[in-house]
Amino acid sequence: MIRKSAIGFVVALGLLGACQQAAQEPPISIDEGSATVDTAQVLTLPEYDAKAFFDTTSYGMPSGAGFAFFPDGQSVLVSSDKTGIFNVYAINVADGSAQQLTSSTTNAIFAVSVFPNDKRVLYTFDGGGNELNHVYVREAGGTAHDLTPGEKLKAQFLGWSGDETGFYLTSNERNPKFFDVYRYDSDDYERTMVFENEGYQIDAISSDGSWLALTKNNTSADSDIFLTDLRSVDKIPTLISAHEGNVSHGIYGFSANNTVLEYSTDAHGEFNQAWSHNLDTGEKTSLVTANWDVSFTGVSNSGHYRVTGINADARTKVSLSNAQTGAELALPDLPPGDIRSIRFSGDESKIAFLLNADTSPSNVHVVDLNAGTDTALTNALNPAINSDVLVDSQVVRYESFDGLKIPGILYRPKTANADHKSPAIVLVHGGPGGQSRTGYNPMVQHLVNHGYAVLAANNRGSSGYGKTFFHMDDKRHGEVDLQDIVYARTYLESLDWVDGENVAIMGGSYGGYMVAAALAFEPDAFNAGVDIFGVTNWVRTLKSIPPWWDSFKKALYDEMGDPAVDEERHRRISPLFHAENITKPLLVVQGVNDPRVLKVESDELVEKVRANGVPVEYLVFEDEGHGFRNRKNRIAASEAYLSFLDKTLNTAP
């Protein structure tokens, strides 16, 4: 188990990356956005439908605070959509056989943790994507019950007590705006409130139950860390990050011996670095530095091993080292790809993790640290797909309107060349503040397999490229960041293998907003748009955010603008109020249960654009929220994307 990893504040409108966001070994980096790529011409390739790409099996590990290995070390706990719906499985370490532990056919269920001394497990699910998660326990015999019963509450797992006699959950049942902390007894599940929260974000609890680490956002660029001594009578949080100016902080977790708190800060440069705070003396010490963000760092339960992940140019570089000496531990030869979600066995003789690459979905691996051997427990790629069809991405950079270099992830169809040009798609990530990253993406591979070039642009305001870049779009959304996306087309037009006359824009959540904004405010920039549960009316969206976002609402309003005073600007940048300008074909996708972007926003946009006489297709999923949990829906959506693009772009040879 890794204690707890934390990532700096990113506004939560982003796409749900369920078990698909990952990274891979660095391919060639093209700093200036040149087209120096493999020129091998493969003019005839098999084309597969969306089902083939999505019939890969997705796997996910328990949360960073949860145990993945069963106590005997013979199995690991995972989440998987093997049946088409995410459920919980135990995978045998020796032979890879899987035992299904939950059997939902509707709601996606995700693994949380194995109990440290027996075969009970914790898992979580919500109601059809409404994000009101409950935490359940599955007894060793198979029966299960809700540890967090009630209506309209949201609960989350926080961690285990070091003596393994209890665990901690957070719940907003008392006040929908704030998450309180409860300790549950491992035997009878009797619970006790250990912290009543009044406005903080709960991040980590020490394994001895003495300390609680909290954060509070002052603005989108400035945040603080607080510590609460849970042994005290008043339990008043104490500020430990006093500073001047804008400094962002986050929590990684407590050390194994509960003597220090490990945290992130951008006080010392452009990127988030790892530091430690001594709980007794208050002394602060540099822990991990890099020329990129330190996405996570943490130690094994014994404190012997440290695992660190660096967000290196849209890829994750993970290192495993001796926590005392810093010496990096050499792992056996692994297939190409990036390591994610390392979890230790109880005796720390083994690690389980996911390995993911552009051309390989996440597979579960187990490494025996004593023997130095690696075992792949899963083979996630659909065997019906010839892996030679899959395309590796390339990191590129292109100039925007003001000369700023914009990073992006480029996928080139293997059939594309100067004599056989490919239509193209500019793909915009969620956020604001998200990041497009390398790794297997069945939706993208499906489109590329059918001849579409895809450029996943990381416009200004994206995370991962330093705090200056991240804040360049603050209160300028739909303006400067939109121009970065418009100039993505200009870049694509410069490539001799791209059909610059046929370029669409596509995105989800904030990316969906950018689609609608591009069609409304730059109506000639793209030939068609695919808006996937995108914001269309910022006035309503910012007034109707879920109550459990209250702890970072101030930061959200600082970045996007407070609806109480910025309504005029919100109306100005909202596509819904300018829909009469939309003249290009549009596909809109929406989940009925979406608590972030209400369905009425998509309904109204579709109605207004259709009134223009513009072709509009509208795909609504009754059992989805803000993103896709069910494989059948992902397949239906991807087939709709391809069909729409084939009809609206001139793709004839």
Image: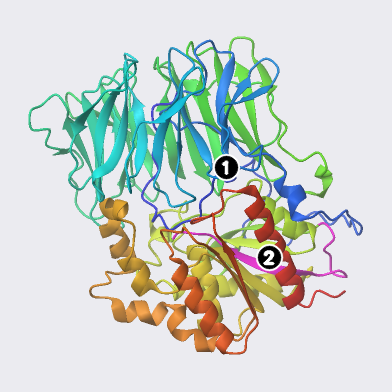
Please say if 80 is above or below 373.
below
Of residues 492 and 509, the one nearer the viewer is 509
Please say if 631 is above or below 540.
above
Of residues 416 and 505, the one nearer the viewer is 505
Circle 1 is placed at which residue position?
19
Highlighted range, magenta? 414-431
Please say if 634 is above or below 183.
below
Q: CA distance from mark 2 to mark 1?
A: 21 Å
Q: Residue furthest left?
A: 233
**Mark found first going from the N terminus, 2 or 1:** 1
Could you tell whether 491 is left or right of 305 in the image? right
Q: Amino acid at mark 2?
A: Tyr
Residue 641 badge:
2
Q: Amino acid at mark 1?
A: Cys
Please say if 52 is above or below 252.
below
In the image, residue 617 lies at what x, y percent?
64, 74
Query: Is 427 in the magenta?
Result: yes
Q: Within 10 Å of the Cα at label 1, are there few (<14), some (14-19), or many (20+) other Cα atoms?
A: some
Could you tell whether 194 is left or right of 186 in the image? left
Q: What's the magenta bit mostly, secondary-structure-wise?
A: loop
Quadrant for the N terminus in the image: top left
SS for callout 2:
helix
Of residues 126 and 306, the one nearer the viewer is 126
**Could you say which quadrant of the image residue 522 lies in?**
bottom right
Q: Is residue 402 visible?
A: no
Q: Within 10 Å of the Cα at label 2, are there few (<14), some (14-19), or many (20+) other Cα atoms?
A: many
